[in-house]
Image (tube, rainbow, N blue to C red):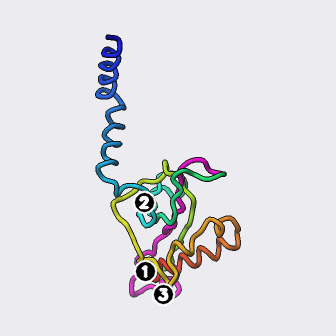
Amino acid sequence: MNELNTLKSNENLRTEGIGLDFMLFDRFLTLFPFYRMKPGRVVILLAGRRAGKKAVIVKQFDEGKKGKTFGHALVAGVERAPMRVTRRMSQKKIKRRSTLKPFAKIVNYNHILPTRFQVTGEFAQGGKELKTIVSEDRLANKETRKALKNEVKNIFTER
């Protein structure tokens, strides 16, 4: 009899409070598996100085790693997009306004919002894909990080 009462009280909690939202979201994820974090998924960053910026998942770590025990992903995206240019602008100003600034970063799953969009082999340059260029090892060192950003910039501008 006590089990029946606790079951009823748990049902009330689920339908009244936060539990319902979580149940709906959990059901949503089971119905629509395309929202899972996979390489090529376009995401929106939610926290930090790049909040609101769009990025592409390059590599995912669902279970975490030795140093980071939480689920995270390696993403690459555009921090500053090219601006509009007009005919009367000087060549110097056109060059300055038409450059973009890329970024590559490791982000916690809690700080990214997956979208329904997916990119496949669209970001490739000279036989190299984005996933072969961007790696954790290249993010660790300052010099390799700068070279990495230049390569990602070339891929994004070519695209």
- Magenta residues? 67-96
User: Disc 2 marks which amino acid?
Assistant: Val
Answer above or below: position of 68 versus 54.
above
**Alpha carbon distance from label 3 to label 1:** 25 Å
Return the residue nearer the eye: 140 or 45: 140
Return the residue nearer the eye: 121 or 142: 121
Quadrant of the image occupied by residue 138? bottom right
Image coords of residue 54 (percent x, y): 44, 63
User: Disc 3 marks which amino acid?
Assistant: Ser
Answer above or below: position of 92 versus 6.
below
Return the residue nearer the eye: 145 or 87: 145
> Which residue position is annotated with label 2?
43
Q: Specify which label sits upstream in the sequence, 3 or 2.
A: 2
Taking the image as shown, residue 30 lies to the left or right of residue 140, namely left
Residue 106 in the magenta stretch? The answer is no
How many other residues sit within 10 Å of disc 1, few (<14), some (14-19) or many (≥20)? few
Q: How many marks?
A: 3
Image coords of residue 18 (percent x, y): 36, 31
How many other residues sit within 10 Å of disc 3, few (<14), some (14-19) or many (≥20)? few
The reply to whether residue 7 is in sight is: yes
Q: Secondary structure at mark 1?
A: loop
Image coords of residue 71 (percent x, y): 53, 50
> Which residue position is annotated with label 3?
90
Screen quadrant of the C terminus: bottom left
> Which residue position is annotated with label 1?
159
The reply to whether residue 97 is in sight is: no
**Alpha carbon distance from label 1 to label 2:** 18 Å
Residue 74 in the magenta stretch? The answer is yes
Taking the image as shown, residue 149 lies to the left or right of residue 123, namely right
Q: Specify which label sits upstream in the sequence, 1 or 2.
A: 2
Single out the mark in the foreground, 3 or 2. Answer: 2
Residue reaching furthest to the top = 1
